[in-house]
Structure formats: structure tokens, C-alpha cells
Image (spheres, rainbow, N blue to C red):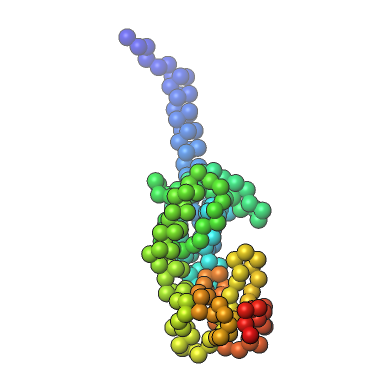
Amino acid sequence: MSKPLTFPVFLLLVVSLSFNAFFVFDTFKKNTVAEVVDGDTFQLVSGKRVRLIGVDAPEYDRCGGKEARRRLTELILNKVVFLKEEKNETFGRSLALVYQGNRLINKIILEEGWGRTDYRKNSQRDALTSAFHKAQENKLGIWSSLCRAPSGQQSQEVGENGCLIKGNIDKNTYKKYYHLPGCRQYNQIVIEKDIGERYFCTESEASAAGFTKASSCP
């Protein structure tokens, strides 16, 4: 037969359980999302700013930016999240795989088309890459007509204002070029508005925005 707990032992047990409960509650509270900054970055109640590793959502003022932030807000605002594989970023943010319950938020944002993958090394990189390509194939989010003008055709934006000059950003060098109708690569260029590509009405307008005439133009 087990002996009954003495009062000091019982008191110690109560204090220990209370401390553990407080610690768990405090941890949950600190891991609650207080603010969503944009489609890939948010801030916790603790003050920590976190970015979804492997995800590059559009800037808020670019095509798809508002929609990406709205979706991330729906998924995590005022909810408790758990961070895995945290890494410190140059700008003082934490990069992490972010879970809300058993859902990987990084993957949801990519598979719904609200960001590009940056291929950073993490245990879920293959799953994130697959989600990214799936969204592209299914033309979801920023890959839909919301932010894409089909190659060889005028987009709805062009039809509204008559602008035909394509402002394109080289993905390798990040240099900005503009292409006129008649330039060799004009029909192959797809305007990707989420990264800042756009149509211009005049060459001077394109130049003022930092784009230079492509060498493939006559």
C-alpha cells in the first residue's frame, strides 16, 4: 500500500504543476501571431519577427502582394504557431518552417500560388518546391491572369491603356530591360507583375523607371 503524501510533498507537487502550467501558457502566448507584415513575414507577441523559409511572396505594393498578405493573415493571425529549423537572417528576422497545428504554412502559401520558392536548404525543400511547381502548372495565385500577361498576347491591362512596351527583369542579373513590339524576343516575354515587371506606353517612361532598351531590339 502506498503511503499518503505528506503536506510538504503535496505542496511541492502543486507548486511544480503550477509552474509547468504557467511555463506552457507563457510559451503559447509568446508564440501567438500578433501581426502579419506581408505574404511571407509576421511578428509574434514576443516581438520576434519571422519569415517563412523557402517562400518569397510579392511585395505588398506589387501584384498579388495584398492577396498573399490576406491569405497569410487568415492562416495565422492571433493563432499559436510553432517554429522549426530556425535560422537567423541578416535583417534580424528568423527564418523558419512555420506550423499552425499540423499544417505547414510555408507549403500552403506556395501551393496556393502566393509566392515563389527561394530553394533555401531545409528538411521540407522538396515538398515546398513541388508545391511551387504545382501552383505554376495550375496557374494559381500570382501564376494566374491576375499577375500574368500571356506571351505573344496583349493582357487586359494593355487593352485598357494601349501600352505595348514590355518592361522585363533578367532573373539572373536582375537588370531591367524594355522590349518594343518588333524586338526579337517580344512575343516570348511574359510580364510577371509580382516581381515588378510592367507595361510602358513610351520609351521615356520605361527609362525613367530604370529600364534600358534590350539589345535584341532594332
Residue 60 appears in the figure: no
Where residue 162 appears, x then y in whole percent? 50, 90
Residue 143 visible in the snapshot:
yes
The residue at 60%/72% (across/down) is 169
Which of the pair 158/12 is nearer the observer?
158
Point 66% across, 53% down: residue: 90
- Residue, far left: 1
The percent coordinates of residue 159 (x first, y second) are 45, 88
Q: Position of residue 180 (x, y in %)?
A: 58, 85
Quarter of image, res 177? bottom right
Q: Is 71 or 7 nearer to us in this picture?
A: 71
Looking at the image, residue 28 lies above or below residue 196: above
| Total marks placed | 0
Against 28, is 184 above or below?
below
Task: Look at the image and tell me in which quarter the N terminus lies.
Answer: top left
Quadrant assignment for the C terminus: bottom right
Q: Quadrant of residue 175?
A: bottom right
Which residue, as the protein is rendered here, is positioned at the far top? 1
Residue drawn where x is 46% and y is 83% of the image: 154
The spot of residue 191 in percent (x, y) is 52, 75
